[in-house]
Image (cartoon, rainbow, N blue to C red):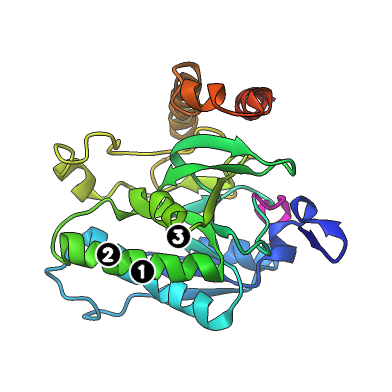
Amino acid sequence: MLMNNIPAEKYDLRQAIDRTFVIAYQEDTTLLESIFQREQLPYEVLRQVEGEIPSDFSRSYACLMNHCKAWRKIVAAGKAALIIEADFVPVKGFANLSMPCDVMDNRTGVAWLYTCASQLYSVTADGFAEGFSVSTVAYIVTPNGAVGLLALAETIRLKYGERSYSAWDSEVESFLRSRSLVCYIPFRNYGEHGGTPNPEHAQNRDRWKHFSRCHRADRLYGELAFLPAYALNHWELRQVRLYARVKGLGRLFFGKFLRWNVMRGSSFPLRLLGFAVRRQWL
């Protein structure tokens, strides 16, 4: 797909994304907003109003309802948008980074800019990586993807209810794929999850054993724009980043990021392997 005769993969975020939605409740978004202003990215803070969501709803369902606000706006505007949670910490110059997908392709649903438990499925001729991730800390959504995600929200409500915990973000890729939409993962992360984990994750690990209580970006595109809330100083940040890098390498070596059966069944196994290896080393 070409946009104005320029290959889609050459477009950066600033050129391709019409608007950024920041999902927030009571968090201070001053630093994050200053980055958007510096990067010249139009944005809108969607802040949950006190009493808007019943207090007995689970935190995970309340989070889903907050994201639904952005999805509805994307459907209404008919343009792809970037959705970022308030505790996201972007890398410096992230608006200049190339797009991880072609948002003009009607098959595109979601493209994660920050991944958690990611898996690589295939790599297109344009170099876009189709795959799986959980976490909705930072991701691009197309209008078709937003329609699908709103349908997912209703499915989650009927399946788990408003008051029960659900790792609904783990169902995004499979649900959109069932609607013939493709999800993409980035070559490297455009930023970091800078906040503390939702305590519901730890409380429900018996039911959702395949998820970690805490998740961090394994590989970043560059230096973070500001110090995340989880780190009191740069030394603590380096410790966390080292742990995340080692964990990412472990997922590569043990076939968690690129599964052996996926590579064996691919028509372009070397393309997959090259993407996975270069992501960690070069």
**For the magenta stretch, what is the residue range?**
94-100
Secondary structure of residue under mark 3:
loop
- State how many labels appear: 3
Q: Residue at x 31, y 63 (%)?
A: 63
Q: Position of residue 117 (x, y in %)?
A: 41, 36
Q: Residues within 10 Å of mark 3 (few under 14, many from 20)?
A: some
Q: Taking the image as drawn, is residue 150 in sight?
A: yes
Find out whether the residues at labels 3 and 2 contact each other: C-beta distance under 8 Å: no
**Residue extending farthest right:** 5
Q: Residues within 10 Å of mark 1 (few under 14, many from 20)?
A: few
Q: Which residue is mark 3?
A: 179
- Spatial CA distance of label 3 from label 2 is 13 Å
Q: Nearer the viewer, mark 3 or mark 2?
A: 3
Q: Nearer the viewer, mark 3 or mark 1?
A: 3
Find out whether the residues at labels 1 and 2 contact each other: C-beta distance under 8 Å: yes
Question: Which kind of residue does numbered mark 2 sit on?
Answer: Thr
Give the mark, 3 or 1, whose residue is nearer the N terminus.
1
Q: Position of residue 220 (x, y in %)?
A: 58, 38
Question: Which kind of residue does numbered mark 1 sit on?
Answer: Ala
Q: Which residue is mark 2?
A: 155
Q: Which residue is mark 1?
A: 151
Q: Nearer the viewer, residue 228 or 163?
A: 163
Residue 251 numbered mark, or none? none
